[in-house]
Image: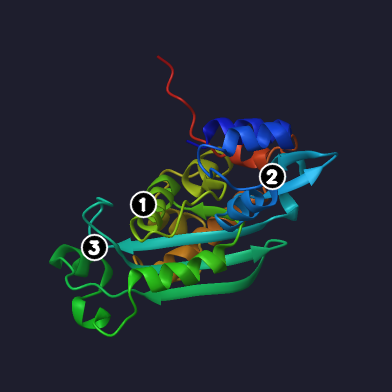
Amino acid sequence: MFKKLIKSLKKGIDKKSFLKLTEKIYPGFDFDSVIDILKFQGLPLEIKDNKVYLSTAIRPYQDFIYTIVDLEVNNSKPKEGQIIEIGAVKLKNFEVVDEFSSLIYTKEVPKYVTVVTGIDSDMLKNEKSQKEILEKFRLFLGDSIFVAHAADFDYNFLASQFEKENLGYLLNRHLCTISLAKKTIKAPRYGLKYLKEELKLPEEIDHRALSDARSAKEVFLKAIQKLPKNIKTAEDLIEFAKPNKNKS
């Protein structure tokens, strides 16, 4: 739905073209309102020389806020499951400026999830609903760049829960620390547990959201130090961090 819009925004588009590309998604809204909605849903935009751009396409990657996110869920299928814990670390100038951590209410937690995470239904019985927590997390995330270890899972699961709770779309630019680490860090394996050992990272509790987000943050910072010199903008970084396509 947004692919054509984002592709155009990387190069910059005039206001008329912008409204034409967004009219089916946001019918009846004026230019300023659409800009505000997209920004609220995480798309970093700016207007320059009467054109609308993705900020990440025209500004250095050092200028951005990055939010490293980890989710614990009670079922890996978004339609059947929900988030039971969310943890995040926010970086500005590659320094920690804030953290977010919350358990989330659900009636049932499968035994295998409890074995892996240590989270059971008794721990969640007095917690707030997923919708309440996601409303807060939306504000915490803002239009920062979303970072996660195995980001496709975390990002897509979170996006599905936003839509399930009628909280709109998740449009933040995002990247994965697994594929980024594979291109910048030599290691025999790239799971978070193994990278923690390989890089001698601070001890954290495995499979708890904030602890894993903190560990992924350390991997991200190590990788950033070893970027090729041709990485200039945040979009360069996002593109560089994409997994290599398998050659047929």
* Lower sequence index among marks 3 and 1: 3
Amino acid type, callout 2: Thr
When asked about the image quadrant of residue 227, the answer is top right
Badge 2 element: helix
Give the percent coordinates (x, y) of residue 145: 59, 53
| In this view, 239 is above or below 173 | above
Per the rendering, the mark at residue 103 is none
* Lower sequence index among marks 1 and 2: 2
Disc 3 to disc 2, how far (Cα)?
A: 33 Å
Per the rendering, the mark at residue 160 is 1
Amino acid type, callout 1: Ser
**Residue depicted at 43% across the width and 61% down the height:** 70
Amino acid type, callout 3: Asn
**Residue depicted at 20% across the width and 77% down the height:** 121
**Which of the two discs, 1 and 2, sits closer to the camera?**
1
- The residue singled out by tag 3 in the image is 74
Per the rendering, the mark at residue 56 is 2
Give the percent coordinates (x, y) of residue 239: 60, 35
| In this view, 22 is above or below 167 | above
CB of mark 3 within 8 Å of CB of mark 2? no
**Residue closest to the eye, 238 or 214:** 238
**Which of the two discs, 3 and 1, sits closer to the camera?**
1
Disc 3 to disc 1, how far (Cα)?
A: 14 Å
When asked about the image quadrant of residue 39, the answer is bottom right
